[in-house]
Amino acid sequence: MHEFDLIRQIDSFAADHEDVKVGIGDDAAVTSSHAHKDVISCVDTICEGIHFKRSTLHLSDIGYKALAVNLSDIAAMGGTPRYYLVSLAMSPEWKQEEILEIYRGMNDLAERYGVLLIGGDTVSAQHDLMISVTVLGEIEKSRSLLRSSAREGDVVFASGTLGDSRGGLDLLLSGGLTAPRTEQEHALVGVHQRPEPQLTLGQLLKESGCRIALNDISDGLSSESWELAEASRVCICLEEEKIPVSENATKLFGNETAYEYALTGGEDFQLVGTVAKSDWPAIASAAKEKGIRLSAIGSVTQEGAPQVLMQKNGERTAIKRAGYRHQ
Ligand SMILES: Nc1ncnc2c1ncn2[C@@H]1O[C@H](COP(=O)(O)OP(=O)(O)O)[C@@H](O)[C@H]1O
Ligand SMILES: Cc1ncc(C[n+]2csc(CCOP(=O)(O)OP(=O)(O)O)c2C)c(N)n1
Ligand SMILES: [Mg+2]
Ligand SMILES: [Mg+2]
Ligand SMILES: [Mg+2]
């Protein structure tokens, strides 16, 4: 593969937009800024062997997911994604046509949310493929939804169902991409390969104007609840029977495994957050109106030392900060 030829081909995915003053082709991209907006920036990387294998994601899914995980972080701030940059490090066995197929998957998602490719980087690696995507987004000044906003008395909520992605990963690791699958199995695999970033929900929560703490679920509900508890210095108490555990995973793997997947499986890219009890009914009905599942799953019981508890049959026990960990 030839670096410059690949970049020329990738350039065909870069759309024209009046806010992109300089896109692919110079030393850096130049975009116009708006005085009344804050910029939201994030970067997440996906690596072959760690985040995907050729047996778990199609080429186009690799691109889709590399962008989706970043759009999920923008969603968790309540923001609107605008631009993205892609850094590729790849070993010689990766063919140009395969890389372009990865870009097609990324472009599918980018087009749906109006996010524009404005640059990146291409280097060789001795082994495997690594894709790092940087997203720049925006939000009205000082309106970002932070992990640190939880307060005593808040309702804790989560979107969608949890544990599906981990269930899908199980099926993919054992059966690969082509095993015959039931509709339920197919649904789990779909969540793992193409999680939907919760941008509509993030923006709905921001638009509400309520004080909301928010985080997205990349490592698992347990880990993300701990991140909220630590950033806000509060105790969060989850109620086990209210957690929206994946119905498909429950049927396929049993109740206990489905709960474990919801708490520690990760990669659901749903949102978990907190809102004042008095604001919860309005938030819940606004989400329902948009067809978004939002469940109350617990409460913020006190401020002070960070803690996460699980209430089951009236008893509360501390839960560990379990979930996916690198290294
Ligand atoms: N290598 C790094 N250098 C600088 N900041 C980092 C690095 N890795 C992570 N961070 C920052 O640490 C915070 C937590 O990162 P992470 O757990 O990856 O968040 P998320 O799960 O939302 O992607 C983020 O603010 C992120 O920008
Ligand atoms: C082949 C394979 N094995 C295991 C996993 C599971 N997995 C890999 S990384 C990860 C956590 C999310 O990734 P991370 O880089 O921690 O994202 P961040 O928290 O920064 O958003 C999970 C659950 C996977 N997706 N694919
Ligand atoms: Mg990250
Ligand atoms: Mg996040
Ligand atoms: Mg992580």
Image (tube, rainbow, N blue to C red):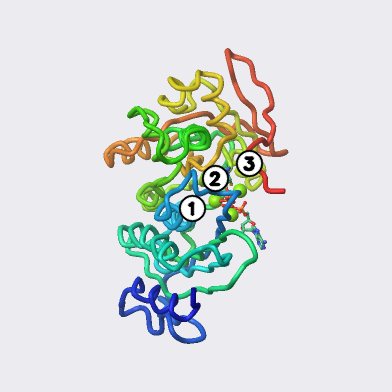
Q: Which residue is mark 2?
A: 218
- The answer to which of marks 3 and 1 sits earlier in the sequence is 1
Please tell me in which quarter of the rendered image ligand 3 is found. Answer: bottom right
Residue at image x 59%, y 14%? 314
Alpha-carbon span between mark 1 and mark 2:
8 Å
Q: Badge 1: few (under 14), some or many (20 or more) residues near its Cα, within 10 Å? A: many
Q: Is mark 2 within 8 Å of ligand 2?
A: yes
User: How busy is the neighbourhood of tag 2: few (under 14 within 10 Å), some, or many (20 plus)?
Assistant: many
**Residue placed most toward the observer, 55 or 140:** 55
Tags 3 and 1 in contact by the CB under 8 Å rule? no
The answer for how far apart the CA atoms under marks 3 and 1 are is 15 Å
Q: Earlier in the sequence, mark 1 or mark 2?
A: 1
Where residue 112 appears, as percent x and y from the top left, is 30, 58
Mark 3, Cα crowd under 10 Å, few <14 / some 14-19 / many 20+, is some
Q: Element type at marker 2?
A: loop
In the image, is residue 36 above or below residue 185?
below
Tag 1: amino acid: Val
> Residue tagged by mark 3?
324
Give the residue at x 53% y 31%: 262
User: Label 2 is placed on what type of residue?
Assistant: Ser
| Residue in front for this viewpoint, 20 or 279 | 20
Residue 288: give its label: none
Could you tell me which secondary element the residue under label 1 belongs to? Answer: helix
Quadrant of residue 161 within the rendered picture = top left
- Are the residues at dot 1 and dot 2 in contact (C-beta closer than 8 Å)? yes
* Dot 1 beta carbon under 8 Å from ligand 2: yes
Query: In x, y percent, where is residue 64?
Result: 41, 55
Identify residue for label 1. Answer: 69
Give the farthest residue toward the top: 313
Callout 3 amino acid: Tyr
Q: Evaluate if marks 2 and 3 touch, with contact meaning CB atoms under 8 Å apart.
A: yes
